[in-house]
Amino acid sequence: MFKEIKMLHGKGVWAYREGELTRALEIAPAMGVTHVLYKVGHGAQYRSGMAAVAARIRAAGLIPIGWMWLLLDDPQGEARVAMQAFQDGFDGMVFDTESERCSRRFEQADRLGQFLQIAHVDLNKLYNCSFPNISHHQDLPYDQMNGFCKGGLMPMAYGTFFAPNSTVPHEQQARQVIDEWTYGHYVYWCRRWGHAPPIYPVLGPYHDEHGSVRMGAAEFQLWLDRLAEHGPSFFSVFTAAVINDDLLPLIRAVPLGSGDVPIPTGLQVQVVSPEIGYLNVRPTPSTAQPPIGRLDDGVIVEALESEPSVKAKVGRTGQWLRIRTPAGAEGYVAAWYLRLMEGTPVSKHGLKVLVLSPDVGYLNMRPEPSTARPPITQLDHGEVVISLEPDETTRAKLGQQDRWLHVRTLDGIEGYVYAWYLGIYREPTPGEAISHLVVHSQVGLNIRRGAGLHTDVIWHVPDRSVLEVQEDAVHAGGKVGQDQWIKVRSPSLHTGYVNGLYVQPKTLADKRLPVNDAELPRGECAWIFGIHAAGATTPADFRFLFQGKQKTGWVLFTEAIGDDPNHTGGHDYSMWSDNGYGVIVRLNYGYDQNGTLPVESRYANFARTCARYVQNSRGCHIWIIGNEQNNVREHPGGSAAPIEHITPRRYAKAFNWARQRIKAVQPNAIVVTGAVDPYNTFPWAKEGNRRNRPLEYFQEMLTHIHDLDGIALHTCTHWLDVNLITKPTVFQNAFLQPGTPHEHYYDFQAYRTFAEAIPEKWQDKPIYITETNHWVALDHQPTSREEEKRVGWLNRNVGWVRAAYAEINRWNSTPYAPQIHCLLLYRWTGDQWAIENKQAVQEDFRQALNHDYRWRR
């Protein structure tokens, strides 16, 4: 039968460093501590001697709770860590879910929960430690973790969100982290989840990552006062080594409350099973696992899903509903044995309205009708939402300034939006053809091999992806919004079926036209043709190739600038930009073993060096930061003796700083992310020979970037074969999981999967494909190690270059596709791929110039 959740009551102190347990036990009485949270594992590695640690904590009259740094590399191994901690005497387990390694590992988090349930671990003693601003970290698997961490949520309300020299007043810092983030985001997400896990905040009384810049008593008291306003039944402080003695009595003096946070309750449903007399409650939405309890006929329970979901499922065969029993336990029941309780308010479906924000591309949704509080989500241009106000009021507000409208998204998020950017949505008329659909599912959408859940998942597309209908367009229109299957094709050319409940028609026509070159700023170009050159001081003038073609193109220069902010380097690129060419400059710390970026401790200097180079240069405003940062050859120390690896989070940190510095000296700058090597999975020696899937590295990198102005990509074929330009070949390496939703394209089509993965908020930003070629100088697949070493262009004109440009033009001509502004041949001069002496390749390029291939806007 069910176990009721037992709320934590008391105060905790965290410890993990060598000798830190002694400090924790020494200060516990002065803090009023009841629990010690001690690190027992890192990923799947369990620390030795933990049974003795638990015994020592208990001997001091305190309750030991274990915690581990979650990686989700090995869900089964990490489940074993939790199981071992319980066996060694710990009374609970906290999963610290903040590592960049956990990004987008939703399936792995689900498997972790499954392993723990199979092992009969008490889920009420599992806790998820999250960032406090959950809405800002939707790449982390918090939905999945909260699904089995029934003990509660431990948001990290740390002072590190504000730098030591921040000008934000201390009280405002405390209010933002505790009131707006820790509790504000919690309430919002509880409404999304449909249930409210207990919340136990974790305070961090310091402002830097190392805990050396600590809060004084007066400042920390502000944080404690804000916390006390919410009446937690339990909170803790991280970590014993950085808690100054003058804070101890302040912590002890904080009164504890009930821990209750007012959350709107869900709909109530009633069990209708008179023939059998009961309804089984199961741990998963299927009959695959045995029941965990029963509900008698007529019992009323609380639904833990959104109102639209509940009303769509109740009474329908094959649907499962997540519920909470009167005793407080949670599980899944067969929805066809349920009915909505009489008196349950049935929400009136108000007017559907359309977001109209073409310039910005999105509209902020806020928790109240003002800009006083941060947005809770963003609505895309063209997105359909439902007004929660009377129809007459809604019509009066649409398109009006200084008016706010209360709305709900199609997936159940409620908030307020500025009515100036709204218009009436016109429902498709019966029989209207629907050619494109847009995904409306926060976690993305599976594409299946056939029309049903019983068929294999072949691909997964992000939320807001645009899908092309591959069946009768009128018939497809009738399936939208229904539990029916529609045949579609993704931008990466994966064809299969999606459920109509998670898509909406793409209502606004794509009216973009090929850009007029004369309207562009100096240093940009309408045509997509171009060549990757070498450094600006290297002879690289290939403009003669454009003679007589009535068009220009693009050039890229790559520069190694070091990290001396006082350098005098820079260059005048006006020879190109003044003559109508688009100019891109890639800024690297160095090349080869020097690293495309310096070590992390030098990122601030590198950012200032980038800004100084930009300030000293003329004729360019498009700057790429680094190159192939996922490839170990580009890491400090190189592949032979790496010093430090450029993780997605590290790259994002360097990029964010560089962009901020560059924008300060050149506000119109287009600062572009470095291109991820789409084919490289070489092990990282400094991180246990970890390998990285390129597409996952790219996705994770983007989640940590604050903002960007453009995205660089690379793509190629592996030998000279025109068919490989359009053929969707895939890696056969087992690590890249061919034939699964995680497969990687092997040749030129790789660009599509990366472009498809760009978040909707940045799909209006330019894409620059800055390197393309065929890898080996062969017209067939290499058959030996010797042939694999023969890299470079073959001096043949077989139409490879023309086919490559035709393919990019095909992409750019596709409705709603993010626009690729250039495809640059690698390269004019400087290494084995130099084409300055390959006349046949040059002629292929000149023949491509006969086409009017321009990007659209």
Image: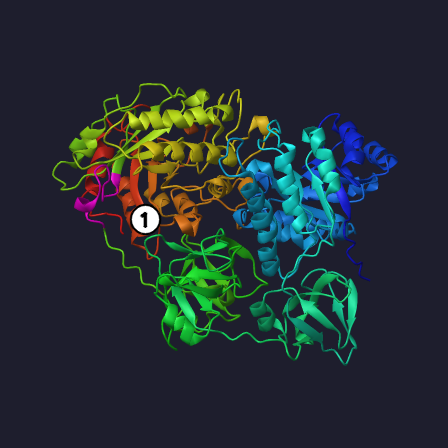
Residue 223 at least partly seen: yes
Residue 776, percent from left and from top:
38, 31
- The residue positioned 73% from the left and 63% from the top of the image is 282
Q: Which residue is mark 1?
A: 819
Position above or below: 584 against 291: above
Q: Quadrant of residue 839?
A: top left
Q: Nearer the viewer, residue 450 or 824?
A: 824
Q: Is residue 597 left or right of residue 284?
A: left
Position above or below: 757 against 497: above
Q: Nearer the viewer, residue 256 or 609?
A: 256
Bounds of the magenta segment: 515-529
Residue 716, percent from left and from top:
37, 38
In the image as oriented, which residue stretches furthest toward the left?
A: 548
Q: Amino acid at mark 1?
A: Gln
Residue 790 at least partly seen: no
Magenta span contains residue 584: no
- The residue positioned 37% from the left and 71% from the top of the image is 396
Q: Is residue 671 left or right of residue 45?
A: left
- The residue positioned 43% from the left and 60% from the top of the image is 417
Q: How is the image coloured?
A: rainbow
Magenta span contains residue 516: yes
Residue 284, percent from left and from top:
69, 60
Taken as a whole, is the magenta stretch helix, strand or loop? loop
In the image as oriented, which residue stretches furthest toward the front?
A: 218
Q: Nearer the viewer, residue 707 or 457?
A: 707
Q: How many marks?
A: 1
